[in-house]
Image (spheres, helix red, strand yellow):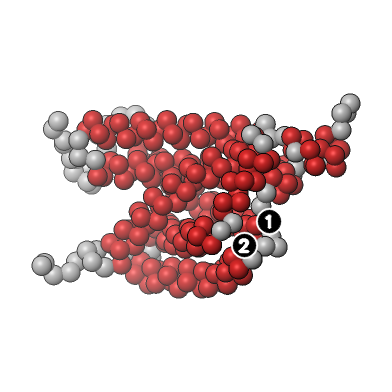
């Protein structure tokens, strides 16, 4: 194994990997989400029925995964913008990654209890 | 197919619009706007309503889309997010598809899917009719016949 570089095996690489994986997951959800919303043009029953399928524990857990993916992708996206456009972005990219993780965890910790309370009422 | 990689720091030799550059720029601009739009959407549709996503039904959507603010908001969200997502998928396809025919086919599928969903989503927003729900039709003044 070659010794570590600035990028390989470090946060630069892993944030890139996570950004791709979360991006693909969000993209496929988006496709489904446009289709389910389009059912409001079919009938109220059709839309309410498909929304009913979101109101289960399994889908609730899926939503938590989706929110976690969105939080990381959104905040890391802001980090990418900072690295590309802010003069000191590359200097602080490592620190920025951990700030992304901490802010994402804090926001998720604020969201998760609310979501779990909702799920207990399904 | 022979691939020629230009010297990275050489002045750009090709003429015409640099679409990859504008694609790169689009990802950052739309991304920044989407952070605000999506966080707002999650808050208003999942966190704030009593019961969370349980509150989201036809009447909930009708209530939001009665307001032009949410119509524009959701239209922006649709276009910015779908193009952002499709362009991201295109980047991934270009990175991993080894055969040129597979790469082209996948990118065509992405383009067609994106266009179809943009049309479907935009029509859903612009032709939405709350009056197809009988219980709403009774209470909403916009649904009263003769107006």
Q: Chain of mark 2?
A: A
Q: Of all residues shown, which one is farthest toward the right?
A: B146
Tag 1: Cα neighbours inside 10 Å, few (<14), some, or many (≥20)?
some
Quarter of the rendering containing residue B120 = top right
Q: Is B131 located above or below residue B8 in the figure?
A: above
Tag 2: Cα neighbours inside 10 Å, few (<14), some, or many (≥20)?
few
- Left or right, residue A98 beside residue A4: right
From the image, tell me which residue sits under label 2.
Answer: A122
Q: Nearer the viewer, residue B142 or A39?
A: A39
Rendered residue at 16%/36% (across/down)? B4
Task: Give coordinates of residue A93: x percent, y percent.
Answer: 36, 66
Disc ID at residue B68: none
Q: Nearer the viewer, residue A100 or A93?
A: A100
Q: Chain of mark 1?
A: B
For label 1, the SS is: helix
Q: Is A59 located above or below residue A48 in the figure?
A: below
Q: Nearer the viewer, residue B105 or B37?
A: B105
Task: Give coordinates of residue A62: x percent, y percent.
Answer: 48, 59
From the image, tell me which residue sits under label 1.
Answer: B55
Q: Is residue B75 visible?
A: no
Rendered residue at 22%/33% (across/down)? B100
Q: Quadrant of the N terminus of chain A?
A: bottom left
Q: Of all residues shown, which one is farthest toward the top?
A: B146
Quarter of the rendering containing residue B20 = top left
């Amino acid at each position: 194994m070659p010794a570590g570089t600035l990028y390989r095996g470090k946060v630069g690489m892993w944030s890139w990997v996570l950004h791709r994986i979360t991006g693909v997951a969000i993209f496929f959800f988006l496709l489904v989400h446009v289709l389910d919303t389009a059912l409001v043009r079919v009938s109220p029953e059709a839309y309410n029925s498909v929304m009913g399928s979101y109101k289960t524990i399994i889908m609730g857990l899926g939503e938590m995964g989706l929110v976690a993916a969105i939080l990381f992708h959104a905040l890391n996206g802001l980090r990418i913008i900072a690295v590309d456009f802010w003069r000191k972005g590359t200097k602080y990219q490592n620190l920025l990654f951990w700030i992304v993780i901490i802010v994402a965890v804090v926001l998720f910790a604020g969201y998760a209890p609310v979501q779990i309370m909702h799920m207990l009422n399904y | 197919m022979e691939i020629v990689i230009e010297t990275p720091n050489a002045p750009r030799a090709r003429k015409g619009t640099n679409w990859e550059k504008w694609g790169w720029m689009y990802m950052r601009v739309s991304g920044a706007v989407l952070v605000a739009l999506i966080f707002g959407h999650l808050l208003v549709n999942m966190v704030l309503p009593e019961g969370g996503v349980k509150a989201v039904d036809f009447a909930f959507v009708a209530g939001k889309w009665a307001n032009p603010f949410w119509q524009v908001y959701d239209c922006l969200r649709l276009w910015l997010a779908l193009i952002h997502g499709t362009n991201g998928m295109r980047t991934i396809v270009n990175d991993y598809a080894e055969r040129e025919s597979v790469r082209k086919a996948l990118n065509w599928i992405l383009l067609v899917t994106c266009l179809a969903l943009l049309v479907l989503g935009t029509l859903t927003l612009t032709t939405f009719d709350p009056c197809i729900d009988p219980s709403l039709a009774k209470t909403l003044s916009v649904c009263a016949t003769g107006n």
